[in-house]
Image (cartoon, rainbow, N blue to C red):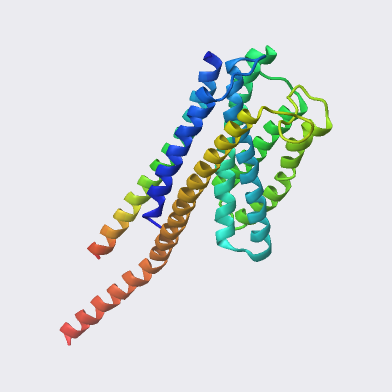
Amino acid sequence: MNYLYAAYIATWAIHIGYLSTLLRRYTRLRSEIEEFKTRIDDK
Amino acid sequence: MKRVFPILAILTAGLLSYALYEALIAAPTEQTMGDVQRIFYYHVPSAWTAFILFFVNFFASIVYLIRRNTKADIVALVTAEVGVIFCTVVLVTGPIWARPVWGIWWTWDLRLTLTLVLWLIYVSYLVLRRFSSSGQTPLLAAVLAVFGALDVPLVYFSIWFFRTQHPQPVIGGGGSIDPRMLHVLLINWLAFSCFAALVCWSRYRLEVLRREVDETLALEALLEPRSSQTRSSQTKTSQTGRAG
């Protein structure tokens, strides 16, 4: 049973890890857009 | 589209939960291997999903090579990235299943080795795209993807034509499976396919946004000296005007 749970946990760890990198990239991009908007408004 | 995505995400989460219940509880226990055989319901659908994604990557790369279409290039990038994730799941769950069943974590068997080579090909594809700054990167990546995709049928058919440590295919190729197990397998495949499609969709939107931001910033950088030049010439004119 340990192997079974290890396989299922590993699968979801890989998927959640990838989803969190996507979220981090998206957050970084949003902050870049906000920064750009602020720069444009200042001009 | 913004409204459809959360609905699809909730439906997919429900389907994945149902598939997990079917795999861990509802599916019959295999007589020889026992409960550890249930790894099969994650291992096999992940492999099929990875193969489909690599095939989409192959066709998108062909389209890019013929038409130089940006959307096709983004689709190729996205499917390779998500395909590598699913292939990683296959390469991780395989040895976890092999250890209690074969007594070893890994063997340099044809199926296993070709799967590892497939993973390495697409990791190198992503590394090329990530670190190459040349304008020819999408073209080079598309060529690599077309040749890399040749490994997919080799992986799939390796257990049909060669005797390997890996079990024979459960569908076709002379293999057989209990209908209840097949039902659970197909549900898990459907769930993982929907999940992969949603992840690809999110990644596609992210990539489109990334490129738009990069283009806007590049345009701003190009226009910046001109606008500052205009401002300085305006200042000079106003000074001249005041002097006059």
* Residue in the image at 63% along x and 50% along y: B56
Q: Position of residue B144 (x, y in %)?
A: 69, 48
> Within the image, what quadrant is residue B139 found in?
bottom right
Count of numbered labels shown in the rendering: 0
Residue, far bottom: B244
Viewed as shown, does residue B165 lie left or right of B207? Answer: right
- Can residue B69 be seen in this snapshot? yes
Q: Quadrant of the C terminus of chain B?
A: bottom left
Q: Position of residue B163 (x, y in %)?
A: 82, 25
- Does residue A4 sit above or below B115 in this rendering? above
Residue toward you, B214 or B90: B90
Residue toward you, B150 or B2: B2
* Residue in the image at 64% along x and 38% along y: B48
Q: Quadrant of the N terminus of chain B?
A: bottom left
Q: Position of residue B94 (x, y in %)?
A: 63, 24
Viewed as shown, does residue B100 lie left or right of B78? Answer: right
* Residue in the image at 44% along x and 57% along y: B214
- Does residue B205 sit above or below B84 in this rendering? below
Residue toward you, B99 or B192: B192
* Residue in the image at 38% along x and 50% along y: A29
- Does residue A8 sit above or below B225 in this rendering? above
Viewed as shown, does residue B1 lie left or right of B81? Answer: left
Viewed as shown, does residue B122 lie left or right of B219? Answer: right
- Can residue A19 be seen in this snapshot? no
Q: Position of residue A35 (x, y in %)?
A: 30, 54
Residue, far front: B179
Residue toward you, A32 or B67: B67
> Within the image, what quadrant is residue B205 found in?
bottom left
